[in-house]
Every structure is written in C-alpha cells, then in structure tokens.
Image (cartoon, rainbow, N blue to C red):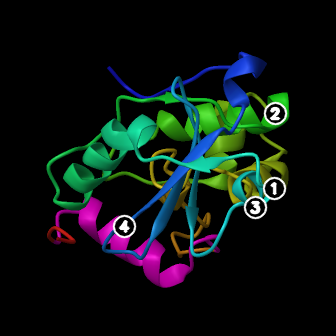
Amino acid sequence: MAATIVTDHRLRATTAFTVVASPVGPLTLAGNPEALTTIWFDGTPPSVASGAAAEDPGPFRAAADQLEAYFAGDRHEFDLVLAPTGTDFQVSVWQALLEIPYGETRSYGQLAAHLGSPGASRAVGLANGRNPLAIVVPCHRVIGADGTLTGYAGGMDRKRLLLDLEAGVGSLL
C-alpha cells in the first residue's frame, strides 16, 4: 500500500513530534497517533514551535523505520497516513507527487498538465515548495523543463543525494 493523503481536518492536528537522525540531517517528524502532518529539515516546524506538540517518538516509529529503509535503498514507497495542511490545490499537487514513481522525475509543466491545468506550472511550483512532508511526498522528484535541478526547500545538495539514491547510485547509510 502506498502513502495516502487524507483530508479529514481532525487528522491535521499536530500533537506530537520527534527528531530522527538521517543521512541528510536531522528530520523533525510531527503529527498525531493517526497521521503524519510534517517532516521538516533543520530546525523546528511552525506546528511544533507553537508549543501545542509534545515530544513523543511513539506515533512515528513506522515513519522512522520506513525512512531508514528508504535511505538504505530498501524501500521505494511509503505506507503511511499523511494529513498535511494546505489548500485544495496544494493537496492535489502533493497527491500527484505521490504518483511519481521512485527513480523517476517530472517537470512542473508535466505535473500541471497531469492535474488538468497545463498553464499552472508556476502554481504547481509554489505548491511543491510548500510541501510539508519532505521525502515521503517526493517533491525532490520535480525538476526543470530542461532537465536541470531546480530549487528544493531542503537544499540542492539534499535533492541531488535523494535523486542519486533513487537512481541506484547507492544507499545513504
């Protein structure tokens, strides 16, 4: 089963978080016992900074284990319930990102066309840049129309590492 984005607003509450080590730096996982709402590089996501979340690794064991297997090159898709907060359009872009197969890339224009809005590549880019679930919702798989690497919230070095991992260059562990 693949990762699933749910739109039930009750599952978007961030009540817990944990920080896990990874080959691309510490990752803050946040959410609740039912769903993962955020995976954040470097620092504290706003959902945790508000003080409404308590540090508790329990709800995130499956996500942490799946991320470790991904970095080892042993997992190509995630089996998690995801509840990111965003507009309907952003959620549709994030859902489309989940459909990009491991090891493949798409351009912003291709994603826009896939969503039925071929002129919306900039809007797709903005939604991609606001993806709150790094790695699991694979925004790193989106590249420029000419095949070049384009911006990534986690930094271009991380994007290159993730794409190299998925291209079979090796594991990150």
Are the residues flagged by discs 3 and 4 in contact, CB closer than 8 Å? no
- Alpha-carbon distance for marks 2 and 3? 26 Å
The type of residue carrying mark 3 is Ala
Q: Position of residue 25 (x, y in %)?
A: 42, 76
Q: Let me know if residue 135 is in the magenta part.
A: no
Ranked by sequence position, the earlier of labels 4 and 1 is 1
Q: Position of residue 19 (x, y in %)?
A: 46, 62
Ranked by sequence position, the earlier of labels 2 and 3 is 3
Q: Residue at x 80, y 56 (%)?
A: 126
- Alpha-carbon distance for marks 2 and 1? 25 Å
Q: Nearer the viewer, residue 58 or 31?
A: 58
Q: Residue at x 69, y 61 (%)?
A: 45
Are the residues flagged by discs 3 and 1 in contact, CB closer than 8 Å? yes
Q: Which residue is mark 1?
A: 50
Secondary structure found at label 4: helix
Q: Nearer the viewer, residue 160 or 66?
A: 66
- Alpha-carbon distance for marks 4 and 1? 30 Å
Q: Taking 22 as reference, is 107 left or right?
A: right
Which residues are the magenta region? 151-169
Ranked by sequence position, the earlier of labels 3 and 4 is 3
Ranked by sequence position, the earlier of labels 2 and 1 is 1
Q: Which residue is mark 4?
A: 162
Q: Which residue is mark 3?
A: 49
Question: How would you rate the neighbour count of disc 4 (Cα within 10 Å): few for under 14, some for 14-19, many for 20 or more?
Answer: many
